[in-house]
Image: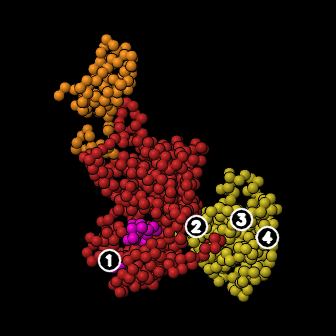
Chain colours: A yellow, B orange, C red
């Protein structure tokens, strides 16, 4: 990981990206880093496009503004790329060599073209997080498989730390069945990510 | 203010019953007078007096605390119509 | 990256969770509250602590913020240690009772998640709410980070209850930016917290029928001014108490707190004065410019009321140009409150620096490093010309294209 890493999550309200940012922040913190995890707030409207952010750093984080130049972009809903909600600025401000991880059944090549990143140094990965979550958790919750994929393709945080934090801090809240379903989803996201 | 040099902070009055030390009897224009022959000791006057100036002992109306009675006349006004034991008289100059 | 594990055990907490946890550790006697965005989760989490029996607190669910503060006043007059939380319109509805709390010298601690005031309706951060209450006789502490908001709660209790002070304290943190962001927090232990705040023994209690007192008596022409003088002296004394409590906190827990934070100010020629979370973002700009050899610095007031005027004057006296950034407009037509106060403070300074005021980030409009850099650019060009171009101006905002920022909502 760089000295200072910035992550931007794109999704729709109720897809769990705020929780994903929280989980990522906590996991990195438990690995000893300084972190921030915060959503872009607004009225809560299920299905509306939302963003969440992370900063992870070796040194205390001073900036308290939104993340505008992310090194990592996670897209929990591929319908944000085209259609009514295109123009959500998925690539806006992102570093040239940013890492993109997208929840889709499509290939990284297809997504690279849809995002307009052909010929650019950006690294594009895909994972069928929707499918994985339905199989593991029983509902469409693409956040935890995306976290697994992030752990695999980057060095932000190892998968074991993400799982350890999740089991440690959320068992009381969710119960064993949901916890283990999500752990499985993280593991599968980690194993099944394409584009490596 | 109990102590003029260091008044209590926040304007708290730090003990009860301080109103007793502030005499208001001089404010009267009319004073209440009771006719003990007529009085049935119903003590309605004691209940309504805003200045706690009705002196009552062992269930009996004894008289008035003239150091605090402001002469408002509530006692006379509330004294039952058939009794009218309390009446108001002009305060002598 | 091999991340070295931090020595002390840390938690990832939002500002609101951290504040609620601090309040739990203080274990106040009474907590009257009416939830409002963005401080809702303070009230929500604290009420969970009450329901779980984690605290001995009497939680009073009230029907409005006016009632919340009224219940705070009643409970504090009864001798209880009292806390509450609010934001924006909630603080506005508490208004008349805020003055009663301070006038009665009741050491209530309130946490405000700073949020804009309506209209238009907006739930995001600016300082209009607490800045409007700046002259209500409350002590105001502004927090830059989640850690500081957490630490300020404990210190607020001690400052408020100090016998020389006996005044209510407002702990302010930026709505959403700090209230809802998870950051690293090094908590203090429950026992350490209890030891630090100590037991509160009120001088009088409304409920002590053996020693009856009157609270809220009238005080007309003569005595009124006596009590206001007392209050004015008390809030002045609060400054020393803030320093003293901050020192003790540092000795015990290793984190330093004073009246304000000076950042790379020693040899600076120009500086920004700014409150709360935006100060952090500004420090990044300071570092960037320092790396380029520019003599720039920052002053972040932590204690805003009482205003540590002599100390601020001392800290700013060597500067050539100062910019005051307000996250509110006082609508006086003469800039924000921070600008006005700091400008007034500088009047006594010999060879006083030039000063200008900028209003930024209203209603949660993002204030980024580039915005801070632009202010420093203005400062440096003013340094060169020796003349302030525009005394007061809105920034993070282009009046020619006011809605030019991404308004897509995604």
- Looking at the image, residue C116 sits to the left or right of residue A11; the answer is left
User: Taking A20 as reference, is C280 left or right?
Assistant: left
Label 1's element? loop
Which quadrant would residue A101 be assigned to in this image?
Answer: bottom right
Q: Earlier in the sequence, mark 3 or mark 2?
A: 2
Query: What segment carries the magenta color?
Result: C319-339
Instruction: Kindly state the secondary structure of the residue where label 2 is placed.
Output: strand
Question: Is residue A115 found left or right of C47 in the rendered image?
Answer: right
Task: Read off the chain for label 3.
Answer: A
Q: On what subunit does the disc labeled 4 rest? A: A
Disc 2 vs disc 4: Cβ atoms closer than 8 Å? no
Question: Residue C122 at what x, y percent from top left?
Answer: 55, 64
Q: Which residue is mark 4?
A: A128
Q: Is residue B18 visible?
A: yes
Work out whether C127 lies above or below C265. above
Mark 2 sits on what residue? A35
Q: Which residue is mark 1?
A: C353
Q: Position of residue C277 (x, y in %)?
A: 49, 67
Q: Is residue C190 visible?
A: no
User: Are there few (<14), some (14-19), or many (20+) residues within 10 Å of tag 3?
Assistant: few
In depth, the one of C241 and C135 nearer the eye is: C135
Quadrant (top left, top right, bottom left, bottom right) of the C terminus of chain C: bottom right
Foreground tag (1 vs 4): 1
Q: Residue at image x 48%, y 49%? A: C66
Q: Which residue is mark 3?
A: A47
Q: Tell me the quadrant of the picture where the N terminus of chain C can be found.
A: bottom right
Q: Are marks 3 and 2 on the same chain?
A: yes
Is residue C328 highlighted in magenta? Answer: yes
Q: Position of residue C54 (x, y in %)?
A: 57, 45
Residue occupying the point 74% across, 77% down: A82
Taking the spot 60% from the left edge, 78% from the top edge, the residue there is A69
Foreground label between 3 and 4: 3
């Amino acid at each position: 990981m760089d000295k200072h890493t910035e992550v931007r999550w794109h999704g729709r309200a109720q897809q769990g990206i705020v929780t994903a940012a929280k989980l990522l922040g906590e996991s990195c913190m438990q690995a000893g880093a300084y972190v921030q995890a915060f959503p872009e707030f607004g009225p809560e409207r299920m299905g509306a496009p939302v963003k969440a952010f992370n900063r992870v750093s070796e040194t205390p984080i001073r900036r308290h503004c939104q993340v505008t130049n992310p090194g990592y972009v996670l897209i929990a809903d591929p319908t944000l790329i085209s259609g009514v909600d295109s123009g959500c600025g998925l690539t806006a401000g992102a570093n040239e060599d940013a890492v993109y991880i997208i929840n889709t059944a499509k290939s990284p090549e297809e997504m690279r073209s849809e995002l307009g990143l052909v010929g650019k140094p950006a690294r594009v990965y895909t994972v069928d997080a929707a499918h994985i979550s339905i199989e593991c958790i029983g509902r469409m919750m693409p956040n935890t498989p995306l976290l697994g994929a992030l752990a695999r393709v980057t060095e932000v945080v190892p998968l074991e730390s993400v799982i350890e934090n999740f089991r440690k801090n959320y068992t009381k809240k969710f119960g064993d069945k949901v916890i283990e379903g999500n752990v499985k989803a993280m593991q599968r996201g980690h194993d099944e990510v394409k584009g490596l | 203010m109990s102590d003029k040099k260091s008044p209590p902070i926040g304007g708290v009055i730090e003990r009860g019953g301080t109103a007793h030390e502030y005499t208001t009897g001089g404010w009267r224009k009319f004073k209440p007078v009771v006719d003990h022959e007529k009085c049935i000791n119903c003590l309605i006057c004691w209940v309504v007096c805003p200045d706690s100036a009705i002196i009552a002992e062992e269930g009996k109306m004894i008289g008035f605390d003239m150091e605090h009675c402001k002469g408002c006349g509530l006692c006379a006004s509330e004294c039952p119509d058939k009794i009218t034991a309390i009446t108001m008289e002009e305060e002598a100059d | 990256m091999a991340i070295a594990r931090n020595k002390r055990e840390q938690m990832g907490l939002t500002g609101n969770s951290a504040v609620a946890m601090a309040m739990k550790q203080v274990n106040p006697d009474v907590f009257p509250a009416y939830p409002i965005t963005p401080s809702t989760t303070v009230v929500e989490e604290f009420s969970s602590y009450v329901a779980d029996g984690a605290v001995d607190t009497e939680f009073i669910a009230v029907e409005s913020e006016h009632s919340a503060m009224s219940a705070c006043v009643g409970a504090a007059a009864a001798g209880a240690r009292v806390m509450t939380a609010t934001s924006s319109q909630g603080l506005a509805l508490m208004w008349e009772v805020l003055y009663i709390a301070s006038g009665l010298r009741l050491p209530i601690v309130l946490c405000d998640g700073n949020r804009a005031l309506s209209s238009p309706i907006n739930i995001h951060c600016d300082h209009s709410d607490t800045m409007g209450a700046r002259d209500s006789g409350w002590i105001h502490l502004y927090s830059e980070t989640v850690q500081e908001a957490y630490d300020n709660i404990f210190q607020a209790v001690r400052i408020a209850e100090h016998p020389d002070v006996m005044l209510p304290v407002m702990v302010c943190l930026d709505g959403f930016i700090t209230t809802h962001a998870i950051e690293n927090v090094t908590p203090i232990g429950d026992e350490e917290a209890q030891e630090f705040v100590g037991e509160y023994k009120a001088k009088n209690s409304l409920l002590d029928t053996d020693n009856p007192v009157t609270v809220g008596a009238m005080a007309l022409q003569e005595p009124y001014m006596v009590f206001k003088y007392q209050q004015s002296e008390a809030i002045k004394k609060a400054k020393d108490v803030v320093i003293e409590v901050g020192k003790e906190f540092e000795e015990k827990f290793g984190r330093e707190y004073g009246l304000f934070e000076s950042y790379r100010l020693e040899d600076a020629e120009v500086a920004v004065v700014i409150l709360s979370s935006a100060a952090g973002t500004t420090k990044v700009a300071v570092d960037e410019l320092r790396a380029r050899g520019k003599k720039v610095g920052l002053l972040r007031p932590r204690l805003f009321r009482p205003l540590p005027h002599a100390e601020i004057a001392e800290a700013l006296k060597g500067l050539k140009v100062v910019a005051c950034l307000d996250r509110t407009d006082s609508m006086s037509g003469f800039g924000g409150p921070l600008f006005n106060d700091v400008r007034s403070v500088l009047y006594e300074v010999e060879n006083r620096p030039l000063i200008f005021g900028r209003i930024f980030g209203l209603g949660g409009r993002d204030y980024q490093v580039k915005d801070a850099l632009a202010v420093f650019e203005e400062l440096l060009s003013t340094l060169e010309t020796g003349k302030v171009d525009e005394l007061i101006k809105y920034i993070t905002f282009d009046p020619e294209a006011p809605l030019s920022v991404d308004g897509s909502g995604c």
